[in-house]
Image (cartoon, rainbow, N blue to C red):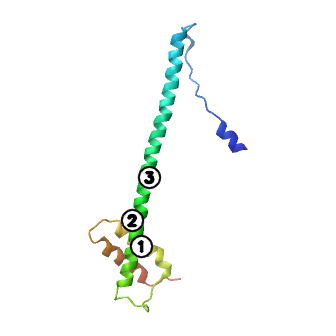
Amino acid sequence: MASEDSKKTTTVEVVEIPAGDLPDEIPRNEFAVRVLKAVKDNLLGKIMKGAVSDSTDYILKKEMTKLADDVIRFRQAMSTRMLNDESLSDKDPVCLERLPASFEAGWKEWRSGWENREELAYQAFLKMMTSPPPPE
């Protein structure tokens, strides 16, 4: 209930104008122009805020999709390379505790963007994965 009350609360900005700067009476048309200008400025601000927010959300979603696609390509490349690597055998020691660090090391090389990034990523992945376990 308290969260509902906080959502309904509207903050009002109070602008103080020295009394000497205001005429005692403002003509109706001038008052209407001032009110409409204030409403228009506030409305345009909200429209622009919404437009900017929508635009940046679109960019964020697009980049997240690209990143997710790249991660999938990276995982597939590492998997394919491991399956095709004849220098590895089922009896070679691996440290599963280092699996997250192995993927991270490979990912850093993958993101480097060099021509042979797949090879560099695989070598970094393997190096971390086949290194001895950390001392206890």
Contact, mark 1 vs mark 2 (Cβ under 8 Å): no
* Badge 2 element: helix
- The numbered dot on residue 75 is 1
Say which residue appears at 38% left-offset and 82% top-offset.
Answer: 82
**Rendered image quadrant of residue 31:** top right
Q: Is residue 28 left or right of residue 131?
A: right
Q: Is residue 62 left or right of residue 30?
A: left
Which residue extends farthest right?
A: 1
Q: Earlier in the sequence, mark 1 or mark 3?
A: 3
- The numbered dot on residue 123 is none
Q: Is residue 30 above or below residue 135?
A: above
Residue indicated by mark 3: 60
List x then y, in percent, for residue 22. 54, 11
- The numbered dot on residue 70 is 2
* Badge 1 element: helix
Near mark 2 (Cα within 10 A), the count class, few <14, some 14-19 or many ≥20, is some
Say which residue appears at 44% left-offset and 58% top-offset.
Answer: 64
- Residue type at mark 3 is Leu
- Residue type at mark 1 is Arg
C-alpha gap between disc 1 and disc 3: 22 Å
Q: Earlier in the sequence, mark 2 or mark 3?
A: 3
Q: Is residue 44 above or below residue 78?
A: above
Near mark 3 (Cα within 10 A), the count class, few <14, some 14-19 or many ≥20, is few
Q: Is residue 24 above or below residue 40?
A: above
List x then y, in percent, for residue 118. 32, 73
- Residue in the foreground of this view, choosing between 90 and 29: 29
* Badge 3 element: helix
Q: Earlier in the sequence, mark 1 or mark 2?
A: 2
Contact, mark 1 vs mark 3 (Cβ under 8 Å): no
List x then y, in percent, for residue 97. 50, 79
C-alpha gap between disc 2 and disc 3: 15 Å
Which residue extends farthest left?
A: 115
